[in-house]
Image (tube, rainbow, N blue to C red):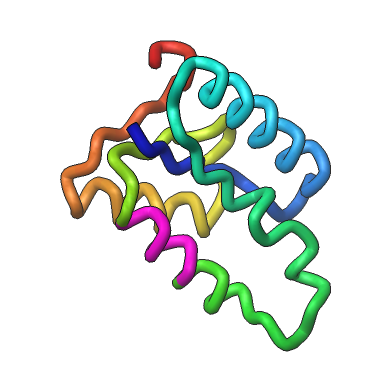
């Protein structure tokens, strides 16, 4: 199963990337395949040629290829993660709020 991780990135960026990385590694170790956008575009916010909107559009394209989405802690405080959540919901994807049940 291909899983997409959705959660906050900005704000407390280093901690958010660390949490996403830890969850990603745990799920890979359980045999899942994981898309971790936190790692994919880490540091892109510093490149003024790449807009947040462009990154989010790419994230949604990746999400559309996934079988399920995992919502990371504090996802509901992230505008991007809320958009990803709504996308998954609209496309009837399984949504997991606790990755440990997988």
4 in magenta: no
Q: Position of residue 57 (x, y in %)?
A: 45, 72
Quarter of the image containing the N terminus? top left
- Please tell me in which quadrant of the rendered image residue 14 appears: top right
Residue 20 located left or right of residue 57? right
Q: How many marks?
A: 0
Residue 97 located left or right of residue 48? left
Where 53 sits versus 17, above or below? Answer: below
Q: Position of residue 64 (x, y in %)?
A: 31, 57
63 in magenta: yes
Is the magenta region chiefly helix, strand or loop?
helix
Residue at horizontal 65%, vertical 49%? 38
- Most extreme residue toward the bottom, as rendered? 49
Where 82 sits versus 32, above or below? Answer: below
Q: Position of residue 96 (x, y in %)?
A: 36, 27
Residue at horizontal 68%, vertical 49%? 39
- Most extreme residue toward the top, as rendered? 101
Residue 56 located left or right of residue 8? left
Residue at horizontal 54%, vertical 25%? 28
Quarter of the image containing the C terminus? top left
Residue at horizontal 49%, vertical 37%? 34
Q: Position of residue 86 (x, y in %)?
A: 31, 52
- Please tell me in which quadrant of the rendered image residue 60 appears: bottom left
Which residue is at the front of the view, 65 or 47? 65
User: Which stretch did the figure color magenta?
Assistant: 58-64
Which residue is at the front of the view, 75 or 6? 6
């Amino acid at each position: 199963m291909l899983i997409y991780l959705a959660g906050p990135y900005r704000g407390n960026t280093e901690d958010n990337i660390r949490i996403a990385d830890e969850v990603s590694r745990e799920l890979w170790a359980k045999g899942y395949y994981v898309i971790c956008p936190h790692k994919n575009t880490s540091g892109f916010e510093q490149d003024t040629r790449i807009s947040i909107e462009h990154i989010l559009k790419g994230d949604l394209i990746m999400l559309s290829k996934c079988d399920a989405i995992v919502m990371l802690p504090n996802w509901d405080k992230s505008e991007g993660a809320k958009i990803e959540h709504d996308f998954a919901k609209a496309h009837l994807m399984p949504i997991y709020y606790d990755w440990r049940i997988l």
